[in-house]
């Protein structure tokens, strides 16, 4: 069983940068896919970026070249934790939303890390990002 906790959200002006973190604790030593999703009120949750233990990544078109997803697995074998990051640069007002960390450990194999909600079974509580013009 895995537990996810996000941090790093905030409010800032367009053009700024922000880094989100998500600490995964528990049974984290297995093969995994992890991702960031964004959701605005009344809208569906949208996959932004995803990564797997091999380091393969996927991005939605609107964030390519501006956002970078990464993961630190070094501590996983020692304390059962690994950390997911989302570096967000050149932020735009349309990047505003609640950002959720998601993970699936074990399970199906994907050629590239998936961006669909249905691929993930574990979710964090979310962290709000607000970008003003």
Image (tube, helix red, strand yellow):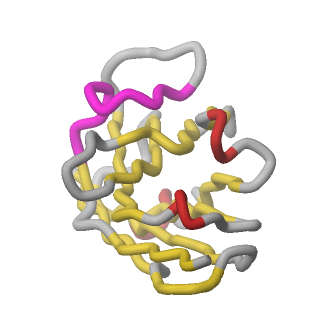
| Left/right of residue 114 with respect to residue 62 in the rendered view | left
Residue drawn at x 74%, y 67% is 89
Q: Which residues are magenta?
A: 113-122
Q: Is residue 29 above or below residue 6?
A: above
Residue drawn at x 35%, y 44% is 103
Residue drawn at x 57%, y 40% is 51
Question: x, y (%) of residue 85?
Answer: 58, 63
Could one spot residue 54 in this view of the protein?
A: no
Report the predominant secondary structure element of the magenta stretch: loop
Question: x, y (%) of residue 110?
Answer: 49, 16
Q: Is residue 49 above or below residue 66?
A: above
Could one spot residue 128 in this view of the protein?
A: yes
Total labels: the figure holds 0
Question: x, y (%) of residue 53?
Answer: 58, 39
| Residue sitting nearer the eye, 85 or 127 | 127
Question: x, y (%) of residue 80?
Answer: 39, 62
């Amino acid at each position: 069983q895995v537990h996810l906790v996000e941090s790093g959200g905030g409010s800032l002006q367009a053009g700024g940068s922000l880094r989100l973190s998500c600490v995964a604790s528990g049974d984290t030593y297995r093969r995994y896919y992890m991702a960031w999703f964004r959701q605005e009120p009344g809208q569906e949750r949208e996959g932004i970026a995803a990564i797997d233990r091999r380091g393969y990544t996927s991005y939605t078109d609107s964030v390519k070249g501006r956002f970078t997803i990464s993961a630190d697995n070094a501590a996983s074998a020692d304390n059962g934790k690994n950390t997911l990051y989302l570096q967000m640069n050149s932020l735009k007002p349309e990047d505003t939303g609640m950002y959720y960390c998601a993970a699936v450990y074990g399970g199906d194999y994907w050629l590239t890390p998936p961006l669909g909600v249905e691929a993930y079974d574990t979710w964090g509580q979310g962290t709000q990002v607000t970008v003003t013009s």
